[in-house]
């Protein structure tokens, strides 16, 4: 099911001292979600991603704009008429019902011609349970399940209605790190097997990067960038996107372009052809540092952390906004920890330039 958002905007009335000023939670969101794709809405708390999800499912009405499921305008339809499956952060299972009864609940609430026969309900519930691999837990109650199992029940309950669109609101936030990894892999498997168009809301960039076909990065209700996960990482549209994606985070330097070269401090570190002389913000991915005894970027060495196949060189630089630089290099390299400084050359494809004031992307002539 293709989903289209047309100039979608949601405003809330102001409260307290700012009662006269409306709060724009979603601002002019226009996007087409292709049929059968998993789209990650990514951003910090308050960026508008959950509001967008609530607009999609009908729990909120937009201030302006339209929502289409396929060719159907669903903007004015109530939530129960939209054919969506919704999975919440807190699972929202009924504690007094068994797993089977929880999964059956949405079907039993249907009325008229939409309500399947009992045999059909049972068949669909068992199929949904098997899909999320909890078929052997149907007689248990939620209190007898682990957090990951409860999450699978919630997903099965959403899928049993055979929704046109599946909406997941921070579904992994209550799980521990290992269970988060396992469950997000399961969500991706289930989405591929069912082919249901899915929107996944998260503030965790690792989750969004790992399972999404397309990422939508949001900030203060405004879409910052839409693209495939790797494309967003490799080609951020502004400094916010560059900083939000990546672990360890990108390193931000105060620099300048002078005579077609990028300077950090007094050293020219890279060519910057075609750009006028100006102060800039230079952002370097952790893997963008190359150990080089003759390299132009000299940093104060703090320590070296061994991580198996990689080494993290922890250092500082007076023009870096980060408290510490973590340069990720191959474990084949040897760092002389007896020296107070370490020198790097920079990989051009891992260095991004932004205007010092608006933080918009600058592209040297060689990037096209």
Image (cartoon, helix red, strand yellow):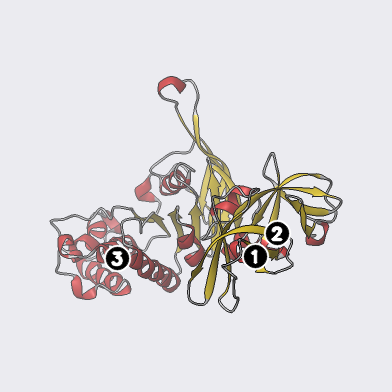
Q: Position of residue 286 (x, y in %)?
A: 59, 62
User: Callout 2: few (<14), some (14-19), or many (20+) C-alpha neighbours within 10 Å?
Assistant: many
Which SS class for mark 2?
strand
The residue nearer to you, when weighing 251 against 155, is 251
Above or below, comparing residue 60 to residue 291 in the picture: above
To which residue does mark 1 refer?
Answer: 289
User: Callout 1: few (<14), some (14-19), or many (20+) C-alpha neighbours within 10 Å?
Assistant: many
Q: Earlier in the sequence, mark 1 or mark 3?
A: 3
Q: Earlier in the sequence, mark 2 or mark 1?
A: 1
To which residue does mark 2 refer?
Answer: 297
Quarter of the image where one finds residue 13: top left
Q: Earlier in the sequence, mark 2 or mark 3?
A: 3
The residue nearer to you, when weighing 112 against 182, is 182
The residue nearer to you, when weighing 156 against 360, is 360
- Quarter holding the C terminus? bottom right
Q: Which of the two discs, 2 and 3, sits closer to the camera?
A: 2
Above or below, comparing residue 31 to residue 328 in the picture: above
Q: Position of residue 157 (x, y in %)?
A: 28, 61
To which residue does mark 3 refer?
Answer: 152
3D distance between C-alphas at marks 2 and 1: 9 Å
Seen at 30% across and 70% down, the residue is: 128
Q: Are marks 2 and 1 in contact (CB under 8 Å)?
A: yes
Q: Which of the two discs, 1 and 3, sits closer to the camera?
A: 1
Above or below, comparing residue 242 to residue 54 in the picture: below
Q: Are marks 2 and 3 in contact (CB under 8 Å)?
A: no
Q: Which mark is residue 9?
A: none
Above or below, comparing residue 48 to residue 225 in the picture: above
């Amino acid at each position: 099911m293709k989903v289209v958002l047309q100039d979608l905007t949601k405003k809330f009335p102001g409260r307290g001292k700012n009662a006269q000023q409306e709060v724009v939670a979603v601002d002019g969101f226009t996007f087409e979600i292709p049929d059968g794709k998993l789209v990650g809405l990514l951003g910090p708390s308050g960026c508008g991603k959950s509001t967008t999800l609530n607009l999609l499912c009908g729990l909120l009405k937009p201030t302006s704009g339209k929502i289409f499921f396929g060719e159907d305008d669903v903007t004015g339809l109530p939530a129960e008429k939209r054919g969506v499956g919704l999975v919440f952060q807190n699972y929202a299972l009924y504690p007094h019902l068994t797993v089977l009864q929880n999964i059956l609940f949405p079907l039993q609430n249907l009325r008229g011609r939409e309500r399947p026969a009992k045999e059909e309900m049972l068949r669909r519930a068992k199929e949904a349970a098997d899909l999320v691999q909890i078929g052997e837990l149907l007689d248990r109650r939620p209190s007898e399940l682990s957090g990951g199992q409860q999450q699978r029940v919630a997903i099965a309950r959403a899928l049993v209605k055979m929704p046109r669109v599946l909406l997941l609101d921070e579904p992994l936030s209550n799980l521990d790190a290992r269970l988060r990894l396992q469950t997000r892999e399961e969500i991706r498997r289930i989405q591929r097997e069912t082919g249901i168009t899915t929107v996944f809301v998260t503030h965790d960039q690792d989750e969004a990067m790992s399972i999404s076909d397309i990422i939508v990065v949001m900030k203060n209700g405004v879409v910052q960038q839409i693209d495939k996960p790797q494309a967003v990482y490799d080609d951020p549209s502004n400094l916010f996107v560059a900083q939000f994606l990546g672990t360890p985070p990108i390193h931000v330097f105060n620099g300048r372009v002078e005579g077609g070269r990028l300077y950090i401090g007094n050293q020219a570190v890279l060519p910057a052809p075609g750009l006028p002389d100006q102060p800039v913000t230079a952002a370097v991915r952790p893997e963008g540092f190359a150990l080089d005894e003759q390299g132009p970027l000299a940093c104060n060495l703090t320590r070296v952390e061994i991580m198996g196949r990689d080494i993290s060189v922890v250092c500082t630089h007076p023009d870096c906004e980060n408290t510490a630089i973590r340069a990720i290099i191959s474990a084949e390299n040897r760092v002389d920890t007896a020296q107070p400084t370490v020198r790097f050359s920079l990989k051009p494809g891992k260095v991004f330039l932004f205007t010092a004031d608006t933080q918009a992307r600058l592209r040297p002539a060689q990037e096209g």
